[in-house]
Amino acid sequence: MTVNQPNAGLVLLCYKYCSFAGFASTRELSANLEGEMGVVRANIQTVEDMYQLIWTAIASKRPIEAVYKGLPRLFCPHRLGRNRGGQLRVLCYQYGGESESGLEAPGSPANWRCTALEKYSRGKLREDAWRTAPNHSRPASCVIEADIDAEDQPAGLAPQKGQ
């Protein structure tokens, strides 16, 4: 039996403090928040939001902090576009955070990543230095149709505040 509820809405109930920062474990977090439930407003980034963020990072050669497939990452996106299958991809140099394959020493060509745009969340621009390494270790098939490429951007011409 189906019930038609035209005015039904979705309410998100969550712990008031959703950040795990400063807690040794989720058990410690739960102990500190016992009984603390409330309604929170979720700030969700869409794929379009992430696309714009990565585009801006490439154009201004600024690193990004984001979550990729559930793991925190620090990376410099170098190319944004589509692979042979038409899916949005980001060729980036990862210099910090976590990765399923692990990270090599800073500057290592092994830290190049070909990533799926839709698997990013909680992204924001950073003020760190732009990082890269020689010899992309990812084949050119990562992004075959580039929308923007860091190599095509003028060096040292990041947008100024207020412009």
Image: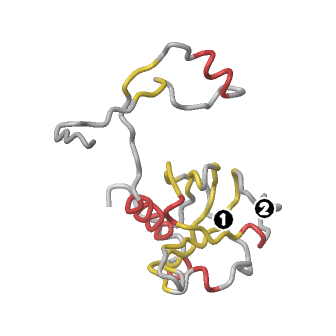
Q: Where is residue 56 shown, x and y percent of the image?
A: 44, 65
Q: Earlier in the sequence, mark 1 or mark 2?
A: 2
Q: Nearer the viewer, residue 116 or 106?
A: 116
Q: Quadrant of the C terminus?
A: bottom left
Residue sitting at x 39%, y 56%: 46
Q: Which residue is mark 1?
A: 131
Q: Quadrant of the N terminus?
A: top left
Three-letter residue code for mark 2: Pro
Question: Which image quarter: residue 129?
Answer: bottom right
Q: CA distance from mark 1 to mark 2?
A: 9 Å
Does residue 139 lie above or below 41 as drawn? Answer: below
Q: Where is residue 150 shown, x and y percent of the image?
A: 54, 76
Residue sitting at x 48%, y 64%: 54
Q: Where is residue 31 shown, x and y percent of the image?
A: 63, 16
Three-letter residue code for mark 1: Arg
Q: Nearer the viewer, residue 7 or 93?
A: 7
Does residue 63 lie above or below 108 as drawn? Answer: above
- For the residues labelled 1 and 2, say whether their Cβ atoms are less than 8 Å apart: yes
Q: Dot 1, crowdedness within 10 Å: few (<14), some or many (≥20)?
A: some
Residue sitting at x 42%, y 61%: 47
Q: Is residue 72 left or right of residue 153?
A: right
Q: Which residue is mark 2?
A: 106
Tell me the element at label 2: loop
User: Which residue ends up furthest to the front in the rendered image?
Assistant: 1
Q: Where is residue 32 shown, x and y percent of the image?
A: 60, 15
Does residue 2 lie above or below 134 as drawn? Answer: above
Residue sitting at x 83%, y 61%: 105
Q: Nearer the viewer, residue 76 or 99?
A: 99
Q: How many marks?
A: 2
